[in-house]
Structures are given as structure tokens and as C-alpha cells.
Image: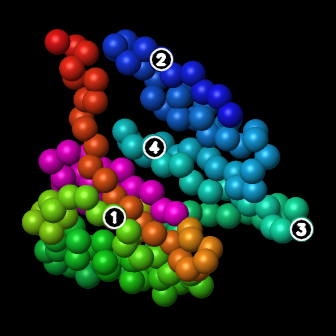
Amino acid sequence: MSVSLPNPASREIDVEGIVRGIVAEFNSTGYAGEYGVIASGNTLHVVPVSSRSVTGARAARRSLLDREVVIAAGRYTGRELLQIVLDQVNEQQEFQIVMGTVSSSAWASTTLEMPEGSYMARDVLLRINASQLSPISWSMLFEPMARQYYLNIHGLMLDPYAHLHK
């Protein structure tokens, strides 16, 4: 698999186009999983679309974060809200999602006011992300031997090329 990235000093970078190109290149490799890209505001989500079984049959898949969760009205820390989401999503599936790496202490200190309602799990993560001082990135990886998913959350630099613009 080979992907060409633009010059980072260029101000004309089509991030969505780059991500879609990387996903398309991955999908063309023949690996068992196939992914799609969902744009949500200025956020991109790479989500499962299908996978192949050991017999080679392709089956449709959807992201575990497309599950609905119910949140009671209240004020929550980011970490509390994340745990509520994971607890409810885990009730809906065979393999559990556990916290892997969470790199920001802001998750414990940032609070959000949530109205009562049903939300897509991904949308709750987006709300937590919007409350942070800097954007976050999350990934979910499946460990077949442990038979569980690991949710990893990391902070992102707002401009990783800032040193080039000086």
C-alpha cells in the first residue's frame, strides 16, 4: 500500500480527500475489513462497512459507536460520560469495549451539561471532544485473544506544522 501526502507547508491541504484516499487504498488491498469515511462537521470518522469471514463471505458491519445510548440530564465529567457510553454500548454487544489509553487529564476535569435524551454514542464523544481545549482522536482496536475492543483516546496538536510556518 502506498499513499502520497502533500507538502505540509502548503496551506491548501484537502484532509478529507487524503483520508478518503487512504481508506480507498486500504480497501483495495484485499484485507478482510472494508471501511468508509463519515464526515461530521469538521470531524472525520473511519468506520467499518464490511468484513470477510474465514469462509470468504462478506458481511455488512457497522461501527460500535453507532449504537444508541440514553443519558439522564445532568452535569458530567468527560470521563463519567465516556463510562456511561461504554457501559450502555457494552450491554448491546457480545465483545466488550474497555478503556485502553486515555492521554488527557482534561477528561476528568472538564464538565459538560447534558440534557436528557437518546444519543448516538459517537455524538456523545463529539460533545466531549468539543468541550476540550484541544481536539482529540480516538481509535478502537479489537484484540482477538482477549476477545475485546480497546478504546484509545489521544490529544491532537492544533497545528502540527506550526514550526514550518515561522
Kindly state the secondary structure of the residue where label 2 is placed.
Answer: loop
- Marks 3 and 2 close (CB-CB < 8 Å): no
Residue in the image at 56% along x and 68% along y: 142
Q: Residue at x 46, y 76 (%)?
A: 97
Q: Is residue 34 magenta?
A: no
* Image position of 7 (left or right of 103): right
Q: Earlier in the sequence, mark 2 or mark 4?
A: 2
Q: Circle 2 is placed at which residue position?
A: 6
Which disc number belongs to residue 55?
3
According to the picture, the residue beneath numbered tag 4 turns out to be 44
The label nearer to you, 1 versus 2, is: 1
Looking at the picture, does residue 6 appear above or below residue 135?
above
x and y percentages locating residue 90 in the rendered image:
47, 82
In this rendering, the answer to whether 103 lies above or below 36 is below
Q: In the structure shown, which secondary structural element does the residue marked by tag 4 occupy?
A: strand
Mark 1 vs mark 3, CA separation in Å? 34 Å
Is label 1 in contact with label 3 (beta carbons under 8 Å)? no
Whether residue 104 sits left or right of residue 154 in the image: it is left
Kind of residue at disc 1: Thr
Q: Earlier in the sequence, mark 1 or mark 2?
A: 2
